[in-house]
Image (cartoon, grey):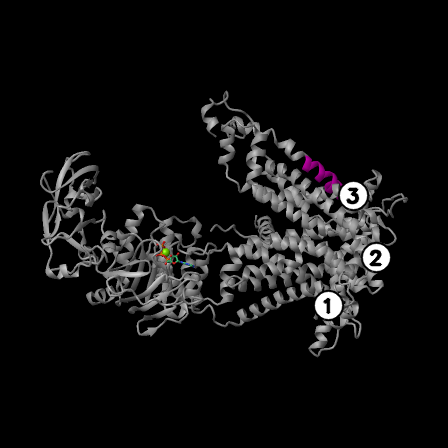
Amino acid sequence: MTTSVVTPPASGHQPGAGGRGTPAAHVARRKKLFWPFVAPTLVLYGLFLVVPTLATVVLSFSNWRGAGDTPQFTGFTQYAQMFSDDGFQNAFVNTLIYITLGGVGTFVLAFLFTMVLRDMRGNKMVRAILFFPNIVAPVALGMFFGVVYRYQPNRQGLANYLLESVGLSAVKFLEADSVTWVVLGSIIWASAGFYITILMAAVDRIPPYLYEDASIAGASPWQKFRNITLPLTWDVVGIAGVLWTINAIKIFELVFVMAGSGTYAPPIHTWTLGIFVFDRSFGGTPAYGAACACAVVMIVLVSVFVVALRRLLRRDAIQF
Amino acid sequence: MSTTALSSSSTGSTGQPPPRRKAPRRPKPAPGTQRISPLRVIGLTVVWLFTAFNLLVLYWLIMAAFKTPLEIFREPLSLPATLFERGTPFRNFVYAWESAEFGTAFLNTVILVAVCSVVIVLVSAPAAYALSRLGVRGSGPMTAFIAIGMGVPFQTVIIPLFIAMSEIDLNNNLFGLALIYVALSLPFTVFLLTGFFRSLPDELEEAASIDGASATRTFWSIMLPLARGGLITALILNAIGLWNETLLAIVFLQENANFTLARALFTFYNAASYQSEYGGLLAGVAIIVLPMLVMYILLARRIITGLTLGAGK
Amino acid sequence: MATVSFRGATRYYAGNDKPAVDGLDLEVADGEFLVLVGPSGCGKSTTLRMLAGLEGVDDGQIWIGDKNVTDMEPRARDIAMVFQNYALYPHMTVHENIAFHLKIAKMPKDQRDARVQEAAKLLDLEPYLDRKPAKLSGGQRQRVAMGRAIVRQPQVFCMDEPLSNLDAKLRVQTRTQIASLQRRLGTTTIYVTHDQVEAMTMGDRVAVMRDGLLQQCDTPVGLFAKPRNVFVAGFIGSPAMNLIPARLSDAGVALGGATIPLTPAQKAAVTGTEVIVGIRPEGWDTVAASEGLPVTIEAVEELGSDQYLYGSSEAEVVAAGEDVEHREAPHPIVIRTPGMSDWSRGQQLGVRPRTGAVHLFDKETGNRLPDA
Ligand SMILES: Nc1ncnc2c1ncn2[C@@H]1O[C@H](COP(=O)(O)OP(=O)(O)OP(=O)(O)O)[C@@H](O)[C@H]1O
Ligand SMILES: [Mg+2]
């Protein structure tokens, strides 16, 4: 800045400078760093994310089985076959359930917590404990749940042990008709801490005097939540929603080991889109074309949800 | 009025100092905050149940790693006994460590995670700096373009990557996996760090250029130290993520000698549950969880603020 | 409308053995404008927050009218509070902000709107009703906060430094606006400030606090004329009163060549051998340097209507007759002279306390010696 004042302006008006005047010498000098600094990231990003994604889209229109097979492009055949496939249908429905119901469940829980945690004693400690499952590998969580939900009379897992010890009868948690909900509950348990943490950070930024004024007005906890917490954390809720979608769509290891033996894919009623892709590519008999088609569906699903969320949650930015 | 003035003054410094009262151990809360509203009761109950449950789970996991299968299922909440009575309290850990080859896996993971986290930050930091502070036109859209990468599920890229890595013989190779880890972690890290760099003040940078420091020097000796907090956070978050990463490790590693912990555990699971080695299984889980738990206990605050920093932007 | 009364109200904060407010006894009459003033951290806000129900009361009671509100929730107390930073809801328009309390109280919408309109008119806020607070100036925000308080038509207003975020000029304007608004509404008001000018110009009565203890509560004139102790004497008035320590002799107190006689009652009240003589800047007569207390002028502050001379005195005269060991350090002295007088730096003059302008305090306790 100061330099630009000292140095006389360069001759006349420079076209292409965007009318912003001549940049200071040191700014121009610094701008030369741009490409060297950004290039490694862009190259890696392009090679490992952009190109493979495009390749996946291209391969999804082929019936390629895998190494040794020559791909033939068959248009939407893969997609048509896939949509009529039982495994895919299960996977699709389950993934939708995890994104939507899981999202609703997690956020309701997180909101309930923000209402209580804001003025609770020891809330830092509680938050740290709630966050803990998020540092555990999903595989480890899956195995752990597998043991917890075990059903075998006389050798019950922790969940059934607790049920039986309060006089209830044991439940076959991992059977076809309940497994989706058990997984859903487990996912909500494991991820709630993360979203609580993010939302609480936003809540902590709300000045306390707003809540005090609401107390004087006589607002109930619900009214405070409705009139202060929610509107003032709305943008963070939007971001958290996007993160949830991104994370929920790729759920894989947790379910894979929790509901199955670990080596082969679990029964198809537990499948998610992530498991479908894995099964068709590296799990059983390879069918790369189908796996790619499913991967494309995943990307489309993420985009749809993210765009919809952004639309839905758009609000004026709030300045404190 | 004047009466009040007189009477009030007696409590002032004119009168004898008020008798020393003992300060209450805990001051009274504001009236109404302790009021029982149904929502608050539900909320408090859920919060405490949730917290207690998390602690119970942790307790159960650690205890189970020292138990026989029978104890795990029959007396899940009691302290371990049998193995201690037999004088082999670490039997499960030994079993897991040996049969799953956790030794090599542990070493592989530590090296892989350490190298990758550092490289990720080394690559991301300059990019984030350039995108957020050089004011080059098009930085905004470019940042957004990179951030979109966070939304791409790994499943979308594994097939082409697998084929390509096999072509150039980097499949079943820790270096190959490291490359993939670095590349796929960039979107999140760049996103996190642009937010961090953006929050730094302009003045120091300007002062440095007035002092005649070169642009590269300004970056190395002014901006990087200033952003140290952000860099460390990025390092930690990536380390946790990679330590726990499983899908890519399953796809790109096929030989036991190359396995990471998560990958080895994945294989071990099948064998252990087949042999009803539930104690060994949970010891394996504990082996992968405990290092993270220690790290978390030491760094919880940093991890949490780092995450919220990334999301709060 | 109602009276407010603090009866030994005490507040501790966790981790501090010393109470933030210590046994406060204070009666506020119905419709009165009472100002709480004191240095930063003396417990003014805490007092107000106890009244509003935002802090618990550890000991003692608080009454509003004939109700003991000590353990009542804020909402049941029928008070309105104006916060230092106004506590406006950033996501609500001015209209919604003003109507918020009424909405929570479930007042019907048409009635609510009528009240908001009325308040907006009173406060000149009508053009801004649809704006968000971020797009308002500081003064306008302050008025919105006031509007939110008055639409409730409460029994008591609590205001915590509502003007401290405004620039100096606006503060003076708003000061009078608030005072006249309060007189018009006739609502009992407790107003916190650390600015003694604000306190003296706005309040029916002013309560001075220090370290959680009430020092004195009186009308502005009463405070100014008869400060109860050295602290109040030094705190009220600008520039501050000159407080000069002096040794007591049989005749009285010697100062500037004159001896101030002490009444027997005053003599009896002195605990030590020293007193503090308090003289306001306007309480001096200027005389030749050889006559009164000699002062060397170090700075001249010309205000047009008045002039303040800042100087220092060799206070040896104060301890006349004593040996050199007892000489006081040079003592700063402020003198008010008529505006545009031609004093300048470095000049010497003598000053002598005017009769009737002398305040005497005991040096040990700091308390005022009984008058006549
Ligand atoms: N929440 C709190 N926890 C602990 N101590 C507090 C708290 N709030 C205030 N205090 C302490 O209590 C004392 C009185 O604080 P208070 O806010 O009432 O002062 P004040 O007179 O309003 O000062 P100011 O003019 O700076 O606003 C101070 O010493 C302060 O440090
Ligand atoms: Mg205050």
Residue in the picture at 62% in, 36% down: B126
Residue in the picture at 56% in, 36% down: B223
Residue B150 visible in the shown view: yes
In the rendered image, residue A138, in percent from the top left (x then y), is placed at 72, 56
Residue type at mark 3 is Leu
Residue extent of the magenta highlight: A40-53
Q: Name the residue under label 3.
A: B174
Q: Name the residue under label 2.
A: A263
Label 1 marks which chain's residue? B
Q: How far apart are marks 3 and 1 (CA)?
A: 38 Å
On whether residue C6 falls in the magenta region, the answer is no
Graded by Cα atoms within 10 Å as few (under 14), some (14 to 19) or many (20 or more), the crowding at tag 1 reads many
In this view, the mark in front (3 or 1): 1
Return the residue found at the far bottom: A167
Residue type at mark 1 is Pro
- Same subunit, labels 3 and 1: the answer reads yes
In the rendered image, residue C109, in percent from the top left (x then y), is placed at 43, 66
Disc 3 is placed on an element classified as helix
Q: Splitting the image into 4 quarters, where does residue C105 fall?
A: bottom left
Graded by Cα atoms within 10 Å as few (under 14), some (14 to 19) or many (20 or more), the crowding at tag 3 reads many
Residue nearest the viewer, comparing C365 with C235: C365
Q: Quick one: quadrant of the N terminus of chain B?
A: bottom left
Q: Splitting the image into 4 quarters, where does residue B131 fall?
A: top right
Kindly identify which numbered label has been placed on residue B80: 1
Residue C108 visible in the shown view: no
- Same subunit, labels 3 and 2: the answer reads no
Q: Distance between the residues labelled 1 and 2?
A: 30 Å
